[in-house]
Every structure is written in C-alpha cells, then in structure tokens.
Amino acid sequence: MYDGPGRTLGQVAFPAVSLLFGCVAPAFFRDLRRVTGATHPGLVATSAAAFAGLAVVGAVPLQRDVPAVMRGEARLGADSVLHQSAAAVFFAAAIAHMVLWMRLCVTAPPASPLSYRVGWRSALFKGACAVTSVFPLPAAFLLHPASPARRVLSLSEADAGGLQQYCLVLCVASFFASYSVELAGALDPAGEQRESKRD
C-alpha cells in the first residue's frame, strides 16, 4: 500500500469501511444490550479503536520509497511510522475484541442466542478466526517492509511480513464479517418478532 492503484484504493476504502462501521455499530451494540441485558464497554472500546486505527492506516499510507527503506537507501518517514503504529492499534484492538466476544459466547447462559451452544456455527467460525489471527502477529510486524528490524537482522527482501499481515487481515475481516450471522438472527428485533408470532 505504498504506491500504485493499491495506495489510492486503501486511502478511500479503509476510511470508508471505518465510517460504515460507525454507522452500524450503535444499532449493533444497542441490540446486543437488549439481548444480554448488559453493556459491553470492552467490546465497544476495542472495536472503536480497531476501526479508528484502520481509518488512519488508509488515510496515511506508507511512504512511496519504502522499497528503498528496505534496502537501506532511504530513511523511514513519519508517515510510515504513523501508518505502522495505526496498524498495530488496529490489529491489537481487533484481537482483543475477538477474545472478548469469544468470552461472551462461552459465558452466555445456555439458552442465550449468543451462547456457543445455540450459535455454535458462528462461534466455531469466530473461534477459528481468533485463534489463527494470533499466530502471525509478532512476525508480521518484525518482517514488515517498513520495520527497521528487517535491516538489522539482514532478513530476506521477500515481503514475508506483508504476506503474514494479509493473512492476519483476512482473519480479522472474516471475524467482523461473520457478525452478519448475529445481525440477521440473534440481534435482529424483526426476526425475534417473527419468531414470537410463529409461537
């Protein structure tokens, strides 16, 4: 995301995704409170931090000469430092959010629509995303093209860090996308009304 079409796409898409999250989050957390009878400040804070970080990642891309930084021919700029710091916030907050959600699924009463016993497919999928997201995290930052550690450790020029970050992004994106299951079922007031009418 340092040059070419990907740079522009990221500058538009990442903040747009964060804005869309900001539009749907109030209804999501309101319905979550209705279903559980409790507020969930940890889930709210971690998701807000993650998507704020994502917006900055898009708005402030890596410097255009980041390949020269990798070769030791240029200095790391403030924009790349900010970009990577925002990415760290995004990943750390997203993983914390996933852990908190999985704890909610495990501790919910057995009859709750959020319990892993009831929504086991969603819980299983989210659990797999959460577990697999942790594995590439340390190496993803160590091997990132903008990381000074690449030069210090004389690491390969191959963008292994970028590949690991893509895998991590896939896990995080899949986890948040899977909330559509809850939005269409457990957290959907219209769905709840339809079910009560059938009974």
Image (tube, rainbow, N blue to C red):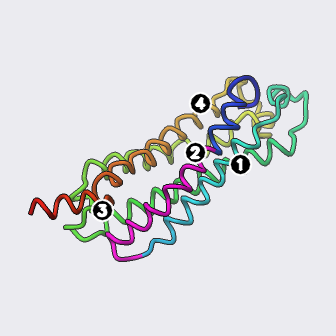
Say left or right for 131 vs 109. right
- Please identify the quadrant where the C terminus is shown: bottom left
Label 4 residue SS: helix
**Residue type marked 1:** Val
Q: Which residues are magenta?
A: 16-38
**Residue type marked 3:** Pro
Say left or right for 18 vs 171. right
First along the sequence among labels 2 and 1: 2
Label 3 residue SS: helix
First along the sequence among labels 2 and 4: 2
Task: Determine which residue is flagged by label 4.
Answer: 163
Say left or right for 170 vs 123. right
Residue at x 74% of width, y 45% of height: 83
Residue at x 46% of width, y 48% of height: 176
Say whether marks 3 and 1 touch (CB < 8 Å).
Answer: no
Camera-near label (2 vs 3) is 3
Label 1 residue SS: helix
Q: CA distance from mark 3 to mark 4?
A: 40 Å
Q: CA distance from mark 2 to mark 1?
A: 12 Å
Camera-near label (4 vs 1) is 1
Say whether marks 2 and 3 touch (CB < 8 Å).
Answer: no
Q: CA distance from mark 4 to mark 1?
A: 20 Å
Task: Determine which residue is flagged by label 2.
Answer: 17
Task: Determine which residue is flagged by label 3.
Answer: 189
Task: Determine which residue is flagged by label 1.
Answer: 56
Q: Nearer the viewer, residue 154 or 11?
A: 11
Q: Is residue 24 above or below residue 66?
A: below
Label 2 residue SS: helix
> Counting other residues with Cα less than 10 Å from the Cα at mark 2, is it few (<14), some (14-19), or many (20 or more)?
some
Q: Main secondary structure of the magenta part?
A: helix
- Please identify the quadrant where the N terminus is shown: top right
> Counting other residues with Cα less than 10 Å from the Cα at mark 1, is it few (<14), some (14-19), or many (20 or more)?
many
